[in-house]
Image: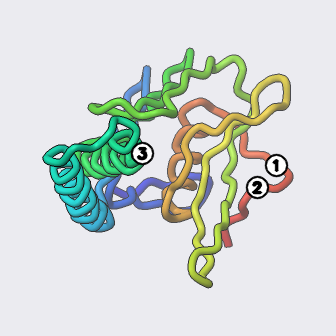
């Protein structure tokens, strides 16, 4: 689906779905990527090793203190498994009405749900994030909201491409009739 926004065409990103009506717009982004397969495999190996390690410890005469020592490894394994499972099943749902914008991560619970009243919203913009990883620079993109007291609220973070962030920003601005104005420090699409 191609949409013309502010005189240029934008295609619906591949992992997105869109539902538009006169009263609301719903943008959904599926989380799944090939990286979740690697995370799941690593989590299975990690948890298998941890289970094996604990079973060996339980079969011997080991004090409680020693059993508690590797608990951090168990917590990491549980978190990795949950993250991988969320990657397979979750999606982020951005719903805008004329009263509010909500962001929810479903069906499995995840942090970052938001509810912002429309009356508080002054502007939307994109923020580019950079991180160094093994000598490479990794970019991600956040959609930010400027609220009435001129503070910024992250609507959605960690998008893989500027096109994904731009699509969300422009569709919401169009639906909410927000005039796009420059924001200092915002990512500018070339």
Select label 3 or label 2 by which is in front.
3
Q: Are marks 1 and 2 in contact (CB under 8 Å)?
A: yes
Q: Are marks 3 and 1 in contact (CB under 8 Å)?
A: no
Q: Label 3, on which residue?
A: 69
Q: Is residue 29 visible?
A: no
- In depth, the one of 188 and 6 nearer the eye is 188
Report, in whole angstroms, how far the alpha carbon at label 3 lies from the one at label 2.
46 Å
Q: Label 2, on which residue?
A: 186
Position in image of residue 47 (x %, y %): 24, 54
**Which secondary structure, mark 2?**
loop
- In depth, the one of 55 and 65 nearer the eye is 65
At x 17% / y 53%, what residue is drawn? 56
Q: Name the N-terminal-most of marks 3 and 2.
A: 3
Packing grade of label 3 (10 A; few <14, some 14-19, many >=20) is: few
At x 42% / y 30%, what residue is drawn? 104
Q: Are marks 3 and 2 in contact (CB under 8 Å)?
A: no
Q: Label 1, on which residue?
A: 183
Q: In this picture, is 80 found above or below 99? A: below
Select label 3 or label 1 by which is in front.
3
Q: Quadrant of residue 146?
A: top right
At x 67% / y 66%, what residue is drawn? 130
Position in image of residue 168 (x %, y %): 52, 47
Question: On the picture, is 179 further left or further right than 158?
Answer: right
Packing grade of label 2 (10 A; few <14, some 14-19, many >=20) is: some
Q: Is residue 137 visible?
A: yes
């Amino acid at each position: 689906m191609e949409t013309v926004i502010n005189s240029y065409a934008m295609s619906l990103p591949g992992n997105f779905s869109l539902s538009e009506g006169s009263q609301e717009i719903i943008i959904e982004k599926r989380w799944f990527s090939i990286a979740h397969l690697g995370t799941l495999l690593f989590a299975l190996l990690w948890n298998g090793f941890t289970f094996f390690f604990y079973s060996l410890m339980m079969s011997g005469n080991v004090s409680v203190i020693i059993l508690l020592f590797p608990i951090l490894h168990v917590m990491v394994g549980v978190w990795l498994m949950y993250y991988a499972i969320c990657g397979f099943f979750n999606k982020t749902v951005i719903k805008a009405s004329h009263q509010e914008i909500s962001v929810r991560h479903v069906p499995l619970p995840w942090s970052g749900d938001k509810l912002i009243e429309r009356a508080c919203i002054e502007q939307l913009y994109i923020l580019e994030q950079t991180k160094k990883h093994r000598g490479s620079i990794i970019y991600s993109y956040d959609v930010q909201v400027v609220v009435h007291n001129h503070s910024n609220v992250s609507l959605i973070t960690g998008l893989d491409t500027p096109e994904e962030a731009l699509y969300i920003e422009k569709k919401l601005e169009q639906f909410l009739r927000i005039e796009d104005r420059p924001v200092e420090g915002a990512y500018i699409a070339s």
